[in-house]
Image (cartoon, grey):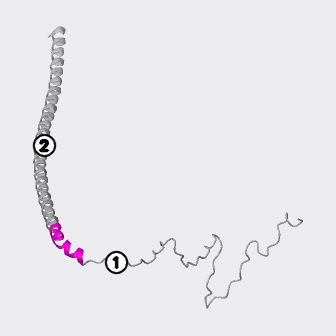
Amino acid sequence: MNKMGKDNLAKLASEVQLARMRMAAAETKAKAAKQRARLAKRRSKETKQAARSAKKEAKQAKLEAAQTAQGLEDAEAKLHKARARAAKQRKKSAPVEAKARIKTKPAPREPARKPAKARAKAVVRRPAPKIGMPGPVPASPGLPKAPALPLPGAGAQPHRNQAGT
């Protein structure tokens, strides 16, 4: 083969290789698109299923609300009838009680009790120990008594600047 033939073969081989690469890329792209379509279809099915389920639950809730409303109406009707009967009974017995009742003065009330805040409380309050100051320590039987520490300002010598004044 001559030089032109080799160049031609090399050129054709590279074109074939490039076509194969394009084919592989196209197949990969098609596979990915098919996968996305399958996922979209599945999501669509799931969405439709969720919508059906939600509609079913809404219907059930509406039915339960209607039943509850009916129960409330029945209870209110019973209460109304009972109140009417009680009022009728009161009307029948009211004239007899009115004649027998004698008006008297109400008994005097006891004075109202003061609120808790206004009442005095016997509370003994002790001042809290100052921070850094030791509190009283109970003596233990086995240890000797510790000498008392002088308190600051009690029997202390005057400061050198205050000595002359």
The circle on residue 104 is: 1
Q: Which residue is situated farthest in the front direction here?
A: 99
The circle on residue 51 is: 2
Tell me the chief SS of the magenta region. helix
Which of the pair 164/80 is nearer the observer? 80
Above or below residue 140? Residue 13 is above
Q: Which residue is situated farthest in the bottom direction here?
A: 141
Which of the pair 108/131 is nearer the observer? 108
Q: Is residue 101 left or right of residue 8?
A: right
Span highlighted in magenta in the image: 86-99
Above or below residue 48? Residue 62 is below
Above or below residue 102? Residue 69 is above
Above or below residue 92? Residue 144 is below
Badge 2 density bin: few <14, some 14–19, many ≥20, Cα 10 Å: few
Q: Residue at x 53, y 77 (%)?
A: 121
Q: In the image, which is nearer the foreground, mark 2 or mark 1?
A: 1
Residue 131 in the image, given as x and y percentages of width and height: 63, 69
Q: Earlier in the sequence, mark 2 or mark 1?
A: 2
Residue 15 in the image, given as x and y percentages of width and height: 17, 17
C-alpha distance separating marks 2 and 1: 73 Å
